Amino acid sequence: MRLVPWQPDDLVRRLDDVVAVYGEAMGYRADLLEARRGYIATHVRRPGFRAVATLTTDGHLAGFGYGYLSAPGQWWHDQVYGALNNEARKTWFANCFEVVELHVRPPAQGHGLGARQLRTLLGMAPGGTTLLSTPEADELASRAWRLYRRFGFVDVLRGFRFPGDERAFAVLGRGLPLDPPR
């Protein structure tokens, strides 16, 4: 496996693979994946966009992650910003890199790929803080939680429900830059 930084055009060229990995990792229905395809394609044009991909030796996509600078007018930003008090808004959104997606195909999970993707992505990230959201109470969450805690993410918002999703999410954050690897 090799980890590579992706430019926006790289992600768009592999959009079918990205959506497939996303769907496998999240267990989402096909109709939801079609809607996500459109969102992902527009995300590559956002300021501060950064992406990474894990490719197998034969070029298949085993995982990916991406994010960008969070800003007013972006759906996720506005949802989370509106749920925080003024002090938390100033702390977390002043110069924030939002980790939008970070996924590894289920058969490839458990081998450190997600950690390498996250470390590389945050190492490239502009900004002074980073935020992400993760489901609170499902099987996928336990692996994700362990990963984010290992990277020093703290609770910013718990039990949050995004419109259109019945699950509770946690919003987690940490300062940037990352400490150098040990």
Image: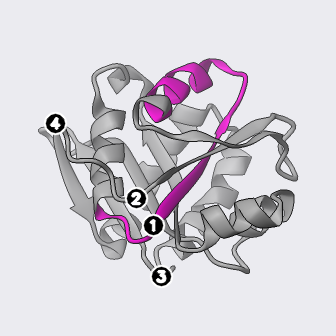
C-alpha distance separating marks 2 and 4: 27 Å
Question: Few, some or many C-alpha atoms within 10 Å of disc 1 (few <14, some 14-19, many ≥20)?
Answer: some
State the extent of the magenta-drawn residues as a range: 124-148
Residue 1 disc label? 4
Q: Amino acid at mark 3?
A: Pro
Q: Which residue is mark 1?
A: 128
For marks 1 and 4, the one nearer the N-term is 4
C-alpha distance separating marks 1 and 2: 5 Å
Q: Amino acid at mark 4?
A: Met
Seen at 80% across and 35% down, the residue is 168
Residue 29 percent location from the top left of the image: 70, 38
C-alpha distance separating marks 3 and 4: 29 Å
C-alpha distance separating marks 1 and 4: 30 Å
Q: Which residue is mark 3?
A: 47
Residue 121 percent location from the top left of the image: 33, 55
For marks 3 and 2, the one nearer the N-term is 3
Q: Amino acid at mark 2?
A: Leu
Q: Quadrant of residue 52?
A: bottom left
Q: Nearer the viewer, residue 103 or 78?
A: 78
Q: Is residue 135 magenta?
A: yes
Residue 99 percent location from the top left of the image: 51, 55
C-alpha distance separating marks 3 and 2: 17 Å
Report if the CB atoms under discs 1 and 2 are less than 8 Å apart: yes
Q: Secondary structure at mark 4?
A: loop
Colour style of the rendered protein structure: one colour
